[in-house]
Image (spheres, coloured by chain):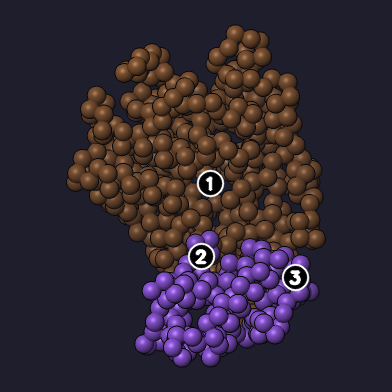
Chain colours: A purple, B brown
């Protein structure tokens, strides 16, 4: 297949879509979010547990179904968020959102994004941005809920 | 263009003929993704030929005015076009002009019927035959588009009626016998799609109408996927109401058609009130015009209606029997081709069984959204998702399917291209 999709389906993404790191719901947990993308039926249930006086993301687990982009982005998030400070995770979520909405105008910051830099290609496929952000928005909303408590 | 009372047969849609027709559709020469467009999404929205665009342009630049009011000549010309369009569309589906009223689209038309029935239940002055009481039944199929499910769900909730449905099998198919067995003395409404937008199943309408009428139930037909693609005579079918959308039949968006058979149109109260639908209004009272104006509150999109009439002219000039035959062959080619691919599951009737010119598939181990992306990269515009039929997809055990739908401009080569790209999807994602 001549591959105009190579920018979208990076090897890392296809790998993660199969690996599904963090797949499975954790116990105990501090907050849970269920999100659904009604246009394609992708869905995720994500649980997060904080540590270090609630300053760190200690553990993260999820279950869901959906396209390779949504599943891979959940997997990347679950591998990389644990151990990070909550503020750093929020910064990373915001950076990914900004990158994906840029339609390719922003150069990805690998330092900031980690493996999520592989999703840079999604920016050129606006219909897929929601897929890539699904797990990340679920985590963001879970953190919002914890902040509000 | 031939305009007759009988549907014109038109020459068969050979490769040469299709090539001629395609020249009428400017968008088919576009390359939105940098590759030639293979448009297999007419089931969602069809493309418009030059003739439709030109008719709208001519109306908007030469005859545009408010219809049915005003004494000026321009208003009279606009009214002529508007009512001529109604006559054209009525003739196209075997109806009388008074049985055709305008809606925004088929969804709006179906909602109008359900809302009007709800209103009939509130307004005590209305024909008792329209009353729906607690314990009555509204019957649908498990394969309905949400537009022909949710309005009935709500009507059941509001009236205390029970929503019943005929179940589909593992392929998403329901049978006439099973549906007939669900019709009881308590059935008040039977609502079903003439052609399923997901499975391509073609409903046998006549026996259902006969059984429904025998118990005094109304039959409401979602004709979105039938009227654009095959000859349909609504009077001959005997349904009480039907709905279809202009944008799925070469016409502009924003306009749809509500067919109400004479008796129902006379009995049904309006769901929406306002201008252009009354005879007398006082500060406390109102009297309504008869159908169809009663169901047309407010200014209608006249330019779009003129465009729809031009679309009907175009379809009739090509010939609905020829379009049906062409799409039947393409539907079979799609179904047989998809069913023969390893790791691809065909939804709907099996190859060889009757189906409309569309097919939905599930690729093992690959989400439909990813399938759609690979197709798109090859220039193929297909639809992925639940196609507004979540209960059907839940029953099929999938979140989404990939659908290819054809029309009069679709070629065999396009269908083959779809099947070819589809056959490579699993290996791309390492699922093969």
Kindly identify which numbered label has been placed on residue A106.
3
Apparent side of residue A3 relative to residue B258 in the rendered image (left or right)? right
Q: Is residue B252 above or below residue B176?
A: above
- Marks 1/3: CA distance? 43 Å
- Neighbourhood count class around disc 3 (C-alpha, 10 Å): few under 14, some 14–19, many 20 upward: few
Image marks 2 and 3: residues in contact by CB distance under 8 Å: no
Instruction: Tell me the subunit letter for badge 2.
Output: A
Residue drawn at x 60%, y 77% is A91
Q: Which quadrant would residue B424 be assigned to in this image?
A: bottom right
From the image, tell me which residue sits under label 2. Answer: A37
Residue A140 seen from this side = yes
- Marks 2/3: CA distance? 25 Å
Q: Secondary structure at mark 3?
A: loop
Residue drawn at x 47%, y 76% is A143
Instruction: Between label 2 and label 3, give the one nearer the viewer.
Output: 3
Q: Is residue B311 above or below residue B23?
A: above
- Marks 2/1: CA distance? 26 Å
- Neighbourhood count class around disc 2 (C-alpha, 10 Å): few under 14, some 14–19, many 20 upward: few
């Amino acid at each position: 297949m001549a591959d105009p999709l190579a920018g979208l389906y990076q090897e890392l993404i296809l790998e993660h879509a199969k690996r599904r790191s963090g797949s499975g719901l954790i116990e105990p947990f501090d907050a849970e979010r269920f999100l659904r993308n009604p246009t394609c039926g992708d869905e995720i249930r994500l649980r997060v547990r904080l540590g270090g006086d609630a300053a760190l993301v200690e553990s993260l687990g999820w279950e869901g179904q959906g396209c390779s982009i949504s599943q891979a982005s959940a997997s990347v998030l679950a591998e990389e968020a644990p151990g990070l400070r909550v503020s750093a995770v929020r910064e990373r979520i915001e950076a990914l959102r900004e990158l994906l909405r840029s339609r390719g105008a922003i150069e990805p910051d690998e330092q900031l994004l980690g493996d999520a830099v592989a999703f840079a290609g999604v920016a050129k496929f606006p219909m897929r941005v929601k897929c890539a952000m699904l797990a990340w928005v679920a985590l963001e909303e879970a953190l919002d809920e914890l902040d509000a408590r | 263009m031939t305009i007759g009372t009988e549907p014109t047969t038109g020459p068969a849609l050979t490769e040469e003929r299709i090539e001629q027709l395609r020249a009428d559709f400017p968008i088919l020469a576009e390359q939105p993704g940098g590759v030639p467009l293979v448009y297999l999404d007419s089931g969602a929205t069809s493309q418009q030929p030059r003739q439709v665009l030109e008719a709208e342009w001519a109306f908007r630049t030469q005859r545009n005015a408010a219809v049915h009011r005003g004494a000026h000549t321009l208003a009279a010309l606009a009214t002529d076009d508007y009512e001529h369009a109604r006559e054209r569309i009525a003739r196209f589906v075997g109806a009388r002009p008074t049985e055709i009223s305008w809606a925004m689209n088929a969804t709006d038309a179906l909602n109008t019927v359900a809302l009007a029935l709800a209103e009939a239940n509130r307004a005590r002055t209305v024909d008792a035959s329209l009353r729906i009481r607690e314990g009555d039944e509204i019957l649908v199929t498990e394969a309905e588009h949400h537009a022909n499910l949710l309005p009935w769900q709500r009507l059941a909730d509001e009236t205390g009626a029970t929503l019943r449905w005929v179940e589909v099998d593992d392929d998403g198919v329901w049978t006439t016998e099973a549906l007939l067995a669900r019709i009881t003395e308590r059935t008040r409404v039977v609502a079903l799609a003439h052609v399923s937008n997901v499975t391509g199943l073609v409903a046998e309408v006549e026996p259902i109408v006969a059984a429904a009428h025998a118990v005094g139930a109304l039959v409401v037909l979602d004709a979105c996927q039938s009227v654009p693609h095959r000859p349909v005579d609504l009077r001959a079918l005997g349904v009480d109401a039907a709905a279809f959308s202009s944008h799925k039949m070469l016409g502009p968006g924003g306009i749809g058609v509500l067919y109400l058979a004479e008796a129902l149109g006379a009995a049904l109260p309006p769901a929406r009130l306002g201008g252009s639908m009354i005879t007398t209004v006082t500060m406390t009272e109102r009297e309504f015009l008869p159908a169809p104006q009663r169901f047309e509150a407010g200014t209608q999109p006249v330019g779009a209606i003129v465009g729809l009439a031009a679309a009907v002219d175009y379809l009739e000039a090509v010939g609905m029997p020829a379009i049906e035959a062409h799409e039947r062959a393409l539907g079979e080619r799609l179904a047989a081709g998809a069913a023969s691919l390893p790791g691809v599951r065909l939804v709907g009737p099996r190859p060889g069984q009757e189906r409309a010119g569309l097919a939905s598939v599930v690729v093992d181990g690959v989400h439909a959204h990813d399938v759609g992306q690979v197709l798109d990269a090859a220039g193929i515009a297909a639809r992925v998702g639940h196609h507004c039929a979540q209960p059907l997809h839940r029953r099929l055990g999938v979140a989404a399917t990939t659908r290819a739908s054809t029309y009069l401009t679709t070629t065999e080569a396009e269908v083959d291209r779809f099947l070819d790209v589809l056959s490579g999807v699993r290996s791309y994602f390492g699922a093969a």
